[in-house]
Amino acid sequence: MQSTHEKPKTVMTWKKVIAFFCVLLLIILAIAEVGIRAFYWMNDRPMPVADMSLDNEREWAKAHIREGRAILSTNIIYDPDTGWKNAPNLNNPGEQTNSEGMRNRKEFSKD
């Protein structure tokens, strides 16, 4: 006599298949991300970014550190409100500032 309550064969539904491949894709992307970051870190290179000024700034800093000139320029001064600003009364080639540190020879009223 056969039992009427036989266990059905396990069949993966399409939802399970999609979920499996989504998890697999996330794992692959995570491994790729870690691998790419490790590659750039081990080769002492910055990660590529859309803003190339970050690369230029990093290269500038590395060059100054190599040459022993890691001290900040006297052309800028610390400002507690804005962080850094131009030093007042500069008269360098291509860079002149007024008494407030603005890039202009002209003085402006505070009104």
Image (cartoon, rainbow, N blue to C red):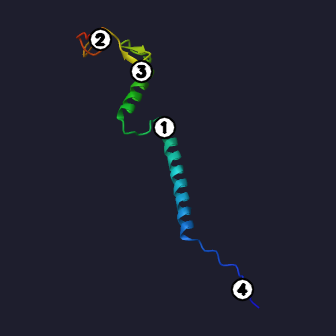
What amino acid is labelled 2 in the image?
Lys
Disc 1 to disc 4, C-alpha distance? 66 Å
Q: Position of residue 35 (x, y in %)?
A: 52, 46
* Tag 3 residue: 64
Label 4 vs label 2, nearer the camera: 2
Label 2 vs label 1, nearer the camera: 2
In front here: 92 or 10? 10
- Which badge, 2 or 1, is on the more N-terminal residue? 1
Label 3 vs label 4, nearer the camera: 4
Instruction: Say if mark 1 contacts mark 4, CB within 8 Å.
Output: no
Disc 3 to disc 4, C-alpha distance? 83 Å
- Which badge, 3 or 2, is on the more N-terminal residue? 3
What element does badge 3 sit on? helix
- Which badge, 1 or 3, is on the more N-terminal residue? 1
In front here: 91 or 89? 89
What amino acid is labelled 3 in the image?
His
Q: Quadrant of residue 50?
A: top left
What amino acid is labelled 1 in the image?
Asn
What amino acid is labelled 4 in the image?
Thr
Disc 1 to disc 3, C-alpha distance? 20 Å
42 up-or-down from 107: above or below: below
* Tag 2 residue: 110
- Residue at 50% over, 50% down: 32
* Tag 4 residue: 4
Q: Position of residue 72 (x, y in %)?
A: 42, 16
